[in-house]
């Protein structure tokens, strides 16, 4: 075993030991003393109660442009994964590659999937290989909230990685308040079966849960592909999926930990081939095994100092195989990719006065990618980040400023040459002013995304001279929030936000056929300009046993290519897959334990080919409905839920020739104690 391999395994083992050492050290702490019980009163005693007035200061609005879906609203959606919930947020485009097991990625304000950071309990989900996160792998069962931030979140103490994305998605898991056990069984269209189990506990100051899921589906849904030149009717083939997921979490005070494992096998159906759908089937297969364990601890000292430490270990395996006799018209490969990642962060904040916070954080991440591709060299990357930040909360004024330093260093195991180190500083500033129930805000953020390991080193395609994609974002917005007021013998609350923004991206990383039709290369090409408007409306009303919620998001944006002013065919033309207008509406009505939800989504037309601007994806409407009822008997509950997705059976696509399932049904039976 060579020196590099020994060093690598020692670092991996050390990271795991340190993670569980942190868990053990916290568990050794003494639990908090229980609260004393009240003494008993005699049956004839009388106690006079005096009037008590409780007041609270109106909370300051966040400087960032943020959207959050939590609690009952989140669980009321007709959704199964995080991607399904995010598609109702303003400024979000979800790319779904068709099929029940298709890859699902998020694009925010046309920045690209690699510019969006996804975090579970404050620690980032990473993929050094291609920079994207498949949101379809994460369930909503254990989630307390799903949030999207377009600027920095700006907690008093957060990691440097949280400053390093154009937009961030936060998945916050639920901290249990009592012991419980729930089981779900689901039967759905296209021969889909699913079973879930969730156990929660709260014992002597410790909270935790274990959540497991298994799903199997043929995914053989019917489709119709209709265009000017063809009309194809068929049934989706090789779109099956089988996956199992188990995860758990443990919390206590400022300590939190999470462990996750996902194992799947799925078909890769490919695009619908014109007039050959009944003769040719892509029988490519994909296997995934993802594992991570993470821990975080936060503590306050002397009331003015806040300290936080994060750690994480990730191990991912991917196999992609098309080496089957049936595949006569595509490349026949059987590739294996193995990726490991060790991460640690130290964060500290000092608050000399109540209105001022100074913070700093240092993050380090060590990634290694191995693959059995021909002429591929195993590569490792060290990613370091350092941030200095300041926040001011002075009366009704909020301000924040930060400067982030990032350094990326790569090495190949064969020492045949790696990309030059990448070293940059980037700033961000935010300002907000609140009066009555209205907040005015503005922010500017400059950030970049480093080329992924695939961009740099993928066989015959990678380019080791790539520059990072540089982004600049401007945003001004207004928010109105009235926490609660009385109306028609009920309680009502409302939040309205509107933001206008401009994004500029230079040195776009694209893949172009520079050496012939069958030989593609990565290169920096392009300058894009995007201006848009996001608006959201969220309202809640409750009277007696009735509860009503209305959630609405609207996006208008104009995203164009301004690479070459002399190219009349492409200059100032729309960017592919970027709709000009989209909107989503979710209405929820509940009476006691009966609840009905209707969700409506509209996405406008999108260009999908730069070669021919006339090639567009047609606009589509999508309506989902969900009816659920829960019957409680003492400490047990029995629930029944019926979901109808795509009620109008609209045949639509997120990507050309990847048809989505039409109308489908889900029937779920649940039992809880």
Image (cartoon, rainbow, N blue to C red):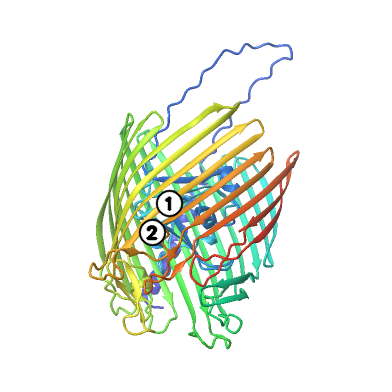
Task: State left or right for residue 464 relative to residue 307.
Answer: left
Q: Quadrant of the C terminus?
A: top right
The count of marks equals: 2
Residue 336 drawn at (x, y percent): 48, 77
The answer to which of 274 and 109 lies nearer the viewer is 274
Q: Position of residue 18 (x, y in %)?
A: 44, 56
Q: Please identify the quarter of the rendering in which residue 439 is found.
A: top left
Disc 1 target residue: 555
Estimate the x, y position of residue 11 in percent, counting from the top left.
40, 65
**Could you say which is closer to the camera, residue 455 or residue 479?**
479
Tell me the mark number nearer the camera, choosing from 2 and 1.
Answer: 1
Bin the neighbour count of mark 2 within 10 Å (Cα to Cα): few under 14, some 14-19, many 20 and up: many
Picture coordinates of residue 235, whole percent (x, y): 63, 74
Quarter occupied by the N terminus: bottom left
Q: Please say if 353 is above or below 425.
A: above
Q: Residue furthest right?
A: 633
Q: Which of the numbered marks, if any, corresponds to residue 283?
A: none
Residue found farthest to the left: 566
**Element carrying mark 2:** loop
Between the C-alphas of marks 2 and 1, the distance is 12 Å
| Image side of residue 168 versus residue 624, left or right | left
Where disc 1 sits, the SS reads strand
Left or right for 322, reference 168: right
Mark 1 surroundings within 10 Å by alpha-carbon count, few (fewer than 14), some (14 through 19), many (20 or more) = many
Q: Of label 2 and label 1, which has the lower sequence position?
A: 2
Residue toward you, 308 or 142: 142
Disc 2 vs disc 1: Cβ atoms closer than 8 Å?
no
Which numbered tag is attached to residue 110? 2
Residue at figure coordinates x 65%, y 50% from the top left:
626
């Amino acid at each position: 075993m060579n020196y590099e391999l020994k060093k690598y395994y020692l670092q991996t083992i050390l990271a795991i030991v340190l993670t569980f050492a942190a868990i053990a050290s916290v568990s050794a702490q003494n639990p908090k003393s229980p609260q004393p019980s009240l003494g008993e009163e005699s049956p004839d005693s009388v106690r006079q109660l005096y009037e008590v007035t409780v007041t609270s200061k109106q909370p300051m609005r966040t400087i960032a442009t943020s959207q959050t879906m939590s609690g009952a609203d989140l669980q009321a959606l007709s959704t199964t994964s995080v991607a399904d919930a995010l598609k109702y947020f303003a400024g979000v485009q979800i790319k779904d590659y068709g099929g029940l097991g298709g890859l699902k990625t998020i694009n925010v304000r046309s920045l690209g999937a690699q510019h969006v950071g996804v975090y579970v309990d404050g620690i980032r989900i990473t993929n050094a290989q291609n920079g994207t996160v498949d949101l379809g792998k994460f369930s909503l069962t254990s989630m307390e909230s799903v949030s999207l931030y377009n600027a920095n979140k700006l907690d008093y103490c957060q990691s440097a990685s949280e400053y390093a994305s154009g937009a961030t998605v936060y998945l916050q898991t639920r901290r249990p308040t009592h012991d419980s056990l729930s089981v779900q069984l689901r039967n759905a269209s296209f021969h889909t079966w699913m079973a879930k189990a969730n156990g929660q506990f709260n014992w002597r100051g410790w909270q935790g849960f274990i959540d497991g899921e298994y799903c199997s589906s043929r995914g053989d849904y019917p489709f119709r592909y209709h265009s000017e030149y063809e009309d194809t009717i068929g049934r989706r083939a090789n779109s099956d999926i089988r996956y199992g997921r188990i995860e758990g979490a443990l919390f206590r005070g400022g300590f939190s930990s999470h462990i996750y494992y996902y194992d799947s096998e799925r078909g890769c159906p490919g695009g619908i081939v014109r007039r050959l759908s009944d003769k040719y089937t892509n029988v490519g297969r994909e296997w995934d095994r993802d594992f991570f364990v993470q821990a975080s601890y936060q503590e306050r000292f002397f009331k003015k100092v806040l300290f936080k430490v994060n750690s994480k270990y990730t191990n991912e395996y991917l196999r992609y195989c098309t080496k089957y006799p049936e595949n006569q018209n595509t490349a026949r490969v059987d590739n294996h990719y193995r990726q490991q990642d060790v991460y640690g962060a130290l964060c500290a904040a000092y608050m000399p006065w109540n209105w001022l916070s100074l913070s700093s954080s240092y993050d380090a991440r060590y990634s290694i990618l191995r693959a059995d591709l021909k002429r591929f060299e195993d590569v490792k990357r060290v990613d370091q980040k350092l941030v200095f930040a300041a926040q001011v909360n002075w009366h009704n004024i909020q301000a924040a400023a930060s400067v982030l330093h990032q350094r990326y260093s790569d090495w190949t195991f064969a020492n045949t040459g790696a990309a030059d180190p990448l070293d940059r500083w980037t700033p961000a500033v935010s300002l907000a002013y609140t009066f009555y129930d209205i907040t005015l805000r503005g922010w500017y953020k400059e950030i970049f995304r480093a080329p992924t390991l695939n961009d740099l080193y993928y066989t015959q395609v990678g380019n080791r001279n790539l520059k990072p994609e540089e982004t600049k974002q401007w945003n001004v917005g207004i928010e109105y929030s009235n926490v609660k007021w009385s109306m028609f013998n009920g309680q009502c609350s409302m939040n309205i936000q509107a933001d206008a923004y401009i994004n500029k991206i230079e040195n776009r990383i694209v893949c172009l056929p520079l050496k012939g039709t069958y030989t593609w290369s990565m290169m920096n090409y392009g300058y894009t300009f995007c201006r848009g408007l996001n608006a959201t409306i969220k309202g809640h009303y409750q009277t007696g046993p009735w509860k009503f919620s209305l959630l609405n998001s609207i996006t208008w944006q104009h995203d164009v290519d301004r690479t070459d002013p002399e190219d009349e065919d492409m200059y100032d033309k729309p960017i592919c897959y970027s709709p000009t207008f989209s909107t989503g509406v979710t209405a929820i009505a509940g009476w006691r334990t009966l609840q009905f939800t209707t969700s409506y989504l509209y996405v406008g037309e999108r260009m999908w080919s730069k070669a021919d601007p006339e090639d567009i994806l047609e606009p589509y409407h999508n309506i989902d409905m969900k009816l659920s009822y829960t019957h409680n008997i003492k400490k047990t509950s029995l629930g029944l839920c019926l979901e109808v997705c795509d009620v109008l059976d609209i045949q639509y696509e997120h990507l050309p020739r990847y048809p989505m399932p039409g109308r489908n049904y889900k029937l779920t039976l649940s039992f809880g104690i």
